Structures are given as C-alpha cells and as structure tokens.
C-alpha cells in the first residue's frame, strides 16, 4: 500500500474545497504539498495553515487553462522538490443551466478548465513519471462523469471525458510503472455551488435540491484510501455510489429517474422573454470568455 510520507504531491484547485482538504490530509500524512490554484491569495492562506499545523506546504499561482503555466509550475516543483510523486488534477468549475439557455462561451470556459486543465496537468507530469518509472496521477472527475445529469450537461461532458482519459491512460501507463485514477465524488460540501455559473435558474432553489452533507475532509480521506488501493475509479459518498451502481446495473431505470429530475429542474427554470438570459454568476465570471 502506498505511503504518502516524504512524497511530493501537487494539488491543482488546492486553495479551496476538496483540493484544500486533499492538501491538508496529504500533509498530515507527511507529504510535501504544493497547492496550485488560480486564486493565489487563498492558496497561500491554505499553505500557511498547513505549515502552522506542522506540515510542509507551499502555494503556486497557476491557471490550469494555460498549458505553459502548468508546465512551468511542474518544472519549478521538480527544481525545488526533486520529483512529483502524486499529481492531483483537481481544479474545476461548474456551470448550471439547461442547454437551451447556454451559449458557446459557457461550453468553452468549462471545457478549458475541467478538461483541458486536466490534459495540461497530465502532459506536464506523465512523461516525467514514465521516465522515472513511478508516480500516480489522480484526476478529479465526478459522479457526473459516470451518470448523465440534467442541468449540468457541459459539466457532465467534461467529467465523462476525464473518466475516459483516466481509464485509457491507466491502461497505457501501467507498463511504465505509473498509476492513474479518477476520483468521482458525489455531492460534497464546498464553495463550488456558490462559485458556479448559474444560467436562468434560481441558485438558492437549485442548491436546496442538493444534499450537500458530506465534508471535503471526509472526501479527501476517501480519495486517499482509493489512491492507496490504486483504484481505477474512486467513487465517494453513499449517494454517489448508489447513482453509479444504478447507472451500471439498471440503466433503463436510471434513464427514467434522470428524466424525472430534468422535469423537476424545469420547474425551477427562470423563463426569460425573447430567449434572453438571466445570468446569476459566481466569482468565475471574470474569467469567462464573454
Ligand atoms: N463539491 C462537489 O460536490 C463536487 C462533486 C464532484 C466533483 N467535484 C469536483 O471537485 C473538484 C474541486 O471542486 P470543489 O468542490 O472543491 O470546488 P471549489 O470551488 O471549492 O474549488 C475549486 C478550486 O479550483 C480553483 N480553480 C478554478 N478555476 C481554476 C483555474 N482555471 N486554474 C486553477 N485553479 C482553478 C478555484 O480557485 C478553487 O480553489 C472540481 O473538479 C469539481 O468539479 C466537486
């Protein structure tokens, strides 16, 4: 079983939520952690908190949509720490809205962060890990990467792609001594819902439909257990595991349940005249293409 003591772990999206909790738990287990995030201030605060608790952590400012910035962050980490043993490609954003209410910029932004961000992380570390003959890449997907969830179609698209990338790379990487896993959490209590871009829905009404009871700290412990066991897919939360099992074993029933959920969401949709948009956006609006 893998040990994290003295290992070097990079966590993208490490300033908040699941990424921050992963960083804290890894540091508690003796890893040297780099919290890489677009939000430099929050990432440094998180690293400081880890250091104050006796762990080893630093922060790095990086926008995962920028391939060369990700490569530079990886190169700097290798220079200062000697190697990267664990790469958590975890940074992600959410867009909530029916496809009828979206425009292409909504798709482009989420694909850039959730999919290309993971690709950039993989391309930056995998060749180094393969040359070294060791390393573990953990890509944060979601249960929405296993189940087609209405009102989250672009999010679902990127997370299914991350699951596919992880499964296929895992097969290739094994002969190079490199491990690849996809983390697939169900609902976890983090700022993601408040940070999400919400289009033509009442954010509070949507949030009330989501069972956010699972803590990021518990999620991080579950993910690390799956990493230790070298699981291909690490499905987290009871709700998440139930959804994944229904999808796998009774897909026709799941189709009906998801169609019911889509009708429920329809009742929360804000109708805007003339095909307009009533956007309610989180702090990522500044990074949006429009
Ligand atoms: N919270 C959930 O219910 C849940 C469920 C399944 C999967 N996930 C996934 O877990 C991951 C972490 O989400 P979270 O819930 O902790 O959300 P969060 O909003 O708390 O954290 C996301 C972090 O990613 C960072 N980030 C966003 N865009 C970035 C960019 N371009 N470059 C670098 N960093 C960027 C943010 O600054 C933030 O610190 C995401 O990939 C998300 O899709 C979350």
Image (cartoon, rainbow, N blue to C red):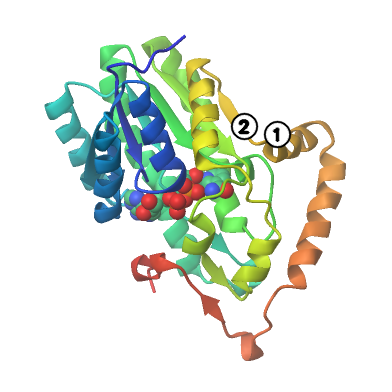
- Residue shown at 60% from the left, 50% from the top: 156
Q: For mark 2, does the 10 Å Cα neighbourhood hold few (<14), some (14 to 19), or many (20 or more) residues?
A: many
The answer to whether residue 257 of the structure is visible from this angle is yes
Q: Image quadrant of residue 48?
A: top left
> Disc 1 beta carbon < 8 A from ligand 1?
no
Secondary structure of the residue carrying numbered label 2: strand
- Residue shown at 38% from the left, 11% from the top: 177
Say if 167 sits above or below 217 in the image.
above
> Of callouts 1 and 2, which one flags the residue occurring earlier in the amino acid sequence?
2
- Horizontal side of residue 285 vs 276, given as left or right: left
**Horizontal and vertical percent for residue 130?**
31, 17
Secondary structure of the residue carrying numbered label 1: helix
3D distance between C-alphas at marks 1 and 2: 6 Å
Q: Are marks 1 and 2 in contact (CB under 8 Å)?
A: yes
User: Which of the numbered marks, if any, corresponds to residue 235?
Assistant: 2
> Disc 2 beta carbon < 8 A from ligand 1?
no
- Horizontal side of residue 108 vs 52, given as left or right: right
* Identity of the residue furthest to the left in this view: 79
- Residue shown at 46% from the left, 35% from the top: 139
The answer to whether residue 196 of the structure is visible from this angle is no
**Horizontal and vertical percent for residue 268?**
72, 73
Q: Which residue is mark 1?
A: 241
- Residue shown at 54% from the left, 22% from the top: 226
Q: Image quadrant of residue 208?
A: bottom right
Q: Image quadrant of residue 14?
A: top left
**Horizontal and vertical percent for residue 105?**
45, 68
């Amino acid at each position: 079983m893998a040990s994290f003591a003295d290992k070097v772990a990079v966590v993208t999206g490490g300033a908040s939520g699941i990424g921050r909790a992963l960083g804290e738990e890894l540091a508690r287990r003796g890893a040297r952690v780099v919290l890489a995030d677009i939000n430099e201030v929050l990432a440094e605060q998180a690293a400081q908190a880890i250091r104050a608790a006796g762990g080893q952590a630093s922060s790095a400012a990086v926008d995962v949509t920028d391939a060369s910035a990700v490569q530079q962050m990886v190169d700097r980490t290798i220079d200062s720490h000697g190697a990267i043993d664990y790469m958590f490609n975890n940074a992600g954003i959410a867009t909530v809205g029916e496809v009828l209410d979206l425009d292409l910029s909504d798709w482009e932004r989420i694909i850039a962060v959730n999919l290309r961000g993971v690709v950039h992380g993989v391309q930056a570390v995998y060749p180094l890990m393969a040359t070294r003959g060791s390393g573990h890449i953990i890509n944060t997907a979601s249960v929405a990467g296993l189940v087609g969830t209405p009102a989250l179609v672009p999010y679902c698209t990127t997370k299914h792609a991350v699951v596919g990338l992880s499964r296929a790379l895992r097969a290739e990487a094994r002969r190079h001594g490199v491990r690849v896993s996809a983390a697939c959490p169900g609902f976890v209590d983090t700022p993601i819902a408040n940070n999400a871009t919400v289009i033509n829905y009442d954010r509070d009404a949507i949030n009330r439909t989501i069972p956010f009871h699972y803590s990021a700290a518990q999620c991080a412990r579950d993910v690390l257990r799956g990493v230790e066991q070298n699981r291909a897919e690490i499905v987290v939360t009871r709700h998440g595991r139930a959804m994944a099992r229904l999808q796998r074993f009774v897909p026709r029933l799941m189709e009906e349940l998801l169609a019911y959920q889509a009708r429920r969401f329809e009742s929360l949709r804000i109708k805007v005249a003339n095909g307009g948009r009533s956007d309610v956006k989180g702090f990522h609006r500044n990074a949006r293409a429009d």
